[in-house]
Image (cartoon, rainbow, N blue to C red):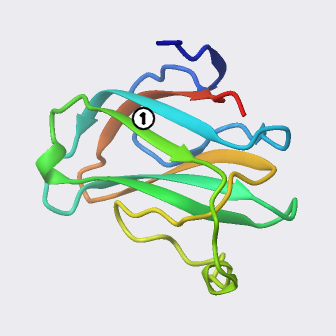
Amino acid sequence: MRRLEPVVTLRAASGDLTAGEESPTLDTSQFKSAIIFFDFTKLTLPDADDEVDFYIRARYDGVTWVDVENIHFALADNGTTPKKVAGISVVEFAAADVAIDAEARIADNTKRQLPLGAELSIETAVAGASAPTYAYSATVYFPPS
């Protein structure tokens, strides 16, 4: 079995974070698919209203970001250190699939069947009165076409 070589560390290992952030923008125009490996080293969400969301976003027009996938953490994830994988690849989609509201956030733990796009980024959002804390890294792999 051939191992994929990492191409880009999109988010280097972080220290403790308590606010949302955006990763650097990654040019993916020469690729057809991407696999994003998340390594969470801290999730502190002690109250029922605490949430941390990771939005994997693609940009198709050079201007507007579109949420492609959401990874959501809440009280049940408090104290865990999961590893998550997200994938974006060439997909067949109908015109109706493209008619989405690009400004609207994607629902928790859902994925839109959209192609990779020209750019990729991760945006995190934090909610809750007790300031949830998280730490993670994200590495992007590009499978051979």
Visible residue check, residue 75: yes
Give residue 134's position: percent from left, percent from top. 34, 35
Left or right of 47 on screen, residue 108? right
Give SS at disc 1.
loop
Question: In this picture, is 97 found above or below 43?
Answer: below
Left or right of 78 on screen, residue 58? right
Q: Quadrant of residue 26?
A: top right
Question: In this picture, is 25 found above or below 9?
Answer: below
Amino acid carrying mark 1 in the image: Leu
Visible residue check, residue 46: no
Q: Residue at x 53, y 35 (%)?
A: 36
Task: In this rendered view, identify the residue nearer to me: 31 or 125.
Answer: 31
Q: Residue at x 31, y 38 (%)?
A: 133
Give residue 20's position: percent from left, percent from top. 50, 49
Q: Residue at x 69, y 51 (%)?
A: 116
The number of callouts visible is 1
Left or right of 97 on screen, residue 126? left
Question: In this picture, is 70 found above or below 21?
Answer: below
Badge 1, how many Cα within 10 Å: few under 14, some, many 20+? some
Q: Residue at x 63, y 83 (%)?
A: 101
Give residue 19's position: percent from left, percent from top. 46, 46
Left or right of 109 on screen, residue 111? right
